[in-house]
Amino acid sequence: GARSRPYGRRVIQRRFVPVNGRGRRLPSRPVFGSFGPRFIDDELRGPLAPAYSQGMVAIDALFRFSGVGLLALLAVLTWRDHRRWVSAPYLMLSCISVTALHLGYTLDPLRLPMAVHIPARFIDLPNLVFVWLFALSLFDDRFRLQP
């Protein structure tokens, strides 16, 4: 049979897998993650990967992709009107990087293809640097990026 073990608030069913097809059954091999042991053949794929409900996925998609659209619009408007504004390049780079951050951290049902996901994750790496430079250029009148 199956025994259950407490795992946070959820209960995971511990499955037994047959060995050698002789009817002898042994437990599956435990995997020790950051939140305690899990078993390979359980539904949990990560430390906190629940089964997503369709409503929560729809709400996440609504907020995530509307935010991506607003950031892309802000980057395009900044590119169009950047002539005399010192902070414009930093704002544009920040918008692109935060957009890539939103696209790279999507839920599993909304995950982008790997050909788009991996470049998005690389583009979001300098996110903090671009936001920092944008904030410095806004609040410090003498700020100029110099080598």
Image: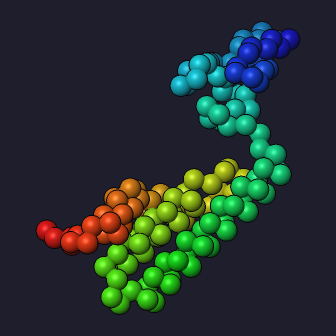
Q: Nearer the viewer, residue 17 or 135?
A: 135
Q: Nearer the viewer, residue 112 or 91?
A: 91
Coloration mode: rainbow
Residue 4 horizontal/vertical position (percent): 79, 14
Residue 13 is drawn in which quadrant?
top right
Residue 30 horizontal/vertical position (percent): 62, 18
Residue 81 horizontal/vertical position (percent): 43, 89
Asked if residue 71 lies left or right of residue 17, the reply is left
Q: Residue at 55% of width from left, 25% of height from top? A: 33
Q: Nearer the viewer, residue 128 or 4?
A: 128
Evaluate whether residue 114 shows in this view: no
Asked if residue 14 lies left or right of residue 80, the reply is right
Q: Residue at 65% of width from left, 61% of height from top? A: 64
Residue 105 horizontal/vertical position (percent): 57, 53
Q: Quadrant of the N terminus?
A: top right
Residue 91 is drawn in which quadrant?
bottom left
Q: Quadrant of the C terminus?
A: bottom left
Asked if residue 76 lies left or right of residue 62, the reply is left
